[in-house]
Amino acid sequence: MATISVKHLFDAGAHLGHRTQKWHPNMKEYIYGANSGIYIIDLRKTLEKLKDAYEYVLNLSANGGKVLFVGTKYQARDVVREQAERSGNFHVNYRWLGGMLTNFATIKQSIAKLKKLEDVAGPDRDYVGILKKEGVRLERERKKLELVLGGITELRKKPAAVFIVDIKKEFIAVNEAKKLGIPIIAIVDTNCDPRGIDFIIPGNDDSIHCIELFTSVIASASIEGRNIYESKMAEMKKEKDKAKAEADKKKDKTKAKKTTTKKAEDEELVEAKESEEVVEEIEAVVDTEESVEEDTAAE
């Protein structure tokens, strides 16, 4: 993990929780104290939990897993999209549709519709061969679908984990992930219930700087893990190619040996045949001489 200190977290405003009137008792262990009616989050615990989340995502990505980034609140939208795209992961940053995970078969139909509209629109979105009025309608529909589904068009199965900004706002996503047994990594503020979250990152989920810091750390972990995975795959491919080359070499050697053996056998057959022909010629000559001798004796 890139060097992240308590000072970095403090500068990003990660220590600022909600007002003391709006808090969840289960967040008590992560609260350092209160100041001017606002709870202060213990950044030492935040740093510790962030490192745990980083290690988990790194190992997950090193085994080929991908993370679904979720953050639909205004402060998180651009950050979630940018970091998910930077790390080659999926994202939902506009609106979470109910059943995005639990009813993915239906969502796939909408994704297929979006891809079809993109094919019709063409690379320049000029809808060649379609009436202008119809093209405008289709483009409006395409944009609407892209806002909601653009970040999961390549999702084929449930993600290996979900990273969520503000579990209170994204409670539907949290519930669906829990139902499917998908590990949840989340930024958890003082007004949220941390129960059921596998990797809690205590921190301010309203500050753009704080969201960007946490999200970039998770994205970097995924990138590092992905590099390990690709290196591993390259090594496996190299070993596979080497084994295949050795097998082909062995096969060619066996084939060459068989060819040599067959050639020797053919030569032996030819020699045997020639020997038989010589014997037959000799026998024919002997028979001829005997016939001549018999005729001479008869005279």
Image: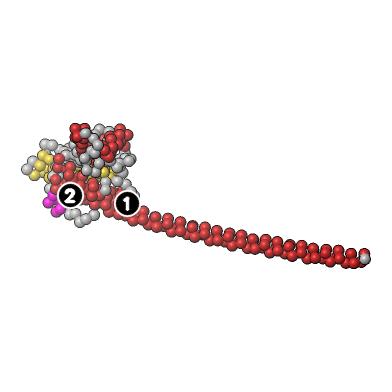
**Can residue 106 be seen at all in this image of the molecule?**
yes
Q: Which amino acid does label 2 sit on?
A: Leu
Identify the residue at the far front of this view.
Answer: 299
Inspect the magenta stretch and tell me whether residue 8 lies in it.
yes
**Residue carrying label 2:** 213
Front residue of 283/18: it is: 283
Q: Quadrant of the C terminus?
A: bottom right
The part of the chain drawn in magenta is 7-12
- Tell me if mark 2 has few (under 14), some (14-19) or many (20+) residues whose alpha carbon lies within 10 angstroms of its own: some
- Residue at 27% x, 40% y is 119
- Tell me if mark 1 has few (under 14), some (14-19) or many (20+) residues whose alpha carbon lies within 10 angstroms of its own: many
Label pair 1/2, CB-CB below 8 angstroms: no
Front residue of 130/143: it is: 130
Question: Helix, strand, or loop for circle 2?
Answer: helix
Question: Helix, strand, or loop for circle 1?
Answer: helix
- How far is disc 1 from disc 2 in space, using C-alphas? 22 Å
- Residue at 47% x, 59% y is 246
Front residue of 276/84: it is: 276
**Residue carrying label 1:** 62
- Residue at 89% x, 64% y is 295
Identify the residue at the far left of this view.
Answer: 36
Q: How is the structure coloured here?
A: secondary structure
Residue 81 image offset from top left, x and y in percent: 21, 44
Residue 68 image offset from top left, x and y in percent: 26, 43
Q: Quadrant of residue 1?
A: bottom left
**Can residue 184 be seen at all in this image of the molecule?**
no
Front residue of 81/98: it is: 81
Dominant secondary structure of the magenta stretch?
helix
